[in-house]
Image (cartoon, helix red, strand yellow):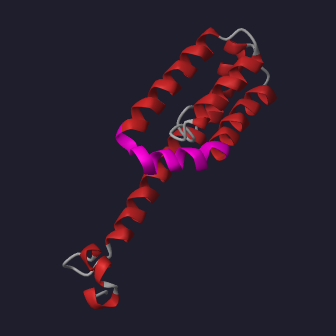
Amino acid sequence: MYSADDFPPTDRGLIRSNGIFYGWVIVAVMWLVNFSAMATGNLSFRLFVIPMGDALGMSRSRLGWAITARRIGAGVSSFFVGRLIDRYGPRVLIPASAAIIGVALIGVNRANAPWQIIALFGLAGMTGLAAPRTS
C-alpha cells in the first residue's frame, strides 16, 4: 500500500512494517467507538422516553429539549474542550468530565422542575465527554 518514501521524513514513523498508515488505524478505531456509543446511547434513548417522562413528570417534547440541550452544549463547548485536551491531555480532563457528569446525573435525580433537567443535560453535554452517553 504505502512505503516510507511516500511521506515526509517526520511522518515515516507512522507507517507500520506491513505498509498500513497508523492514522487509518486510529480512524477505524474511532469509527467503531462512535458506532457503539451511538447504538447504545442515542438510538436506544427512545426506549426510555415514556418511563423517564412519567418518572420525571415531563412531556415527551420537554424530554426532547433535554437531549437537544445536551447536544447544543457539546457543540458550543467543543472548541474550548478541544483546546483544554490539547493543553492538559485526556488524563486530566476525562476524570474531571466524569465528575461533572456524575454531579449532573445526581442533580437529575434531585430535580423538581423540567427546566432543571434540561439545564443539567446541557451541563453534562458541555463536558465534551457526554455527547452520546448521558442518555
- Tell me what residue is drawn at x 43 percent, y 37 percent: 93
Q: Residue furthest bottom?
A: 5
Nearer the observer, 116 or 50 = 116
- Tell me what residue is drawn at x 52 percent, y 49 percent: 82
Queried whether the magenta region covers residue 23, the answer comes back as no
Give percent across and percent down for residue 87. Answer: 43, 48
Q: Residue furthest left?
A: 17
Q: How many marks?
A: 0
Q: Quadrant of the rendered structure where residue 77 is?
A: top right
Give percent across and percent down for residue 31. Answer: 46, 59
Q: Quadrant of the C terminus?
A: top right
Give percent across and percent down for residue 94. Answer: 41, 36
State the predominant SS element of the stretch in magenta.
helix
Q: Quadrant of the N terminus?
A: bottom left
Give percent across and percent down for residue 96. Answer: 44, 30
Would residue 63 be seen by someone viewing this image from the given angle?
Answer: yes
Q: Quadrant of the rendered structure where residue 107 is?
A: top right
> Compared with residue 45, is residue 36 higher up or lower down, i.e. above or below?
below
Which residues lie in the magenta part?
76-91
Would residue 43 be seen by someone viewing this image from the given angle?
Answer: no
Queried whether the magenta region covers residue 82, the answer comes back as yes
> Compared with residue 117, is residue 28 higher up or lower down, i.e. above or below?
below
Side of 104 where 71 appears, left or right = right
Q: Residue furthest front?
A: 87
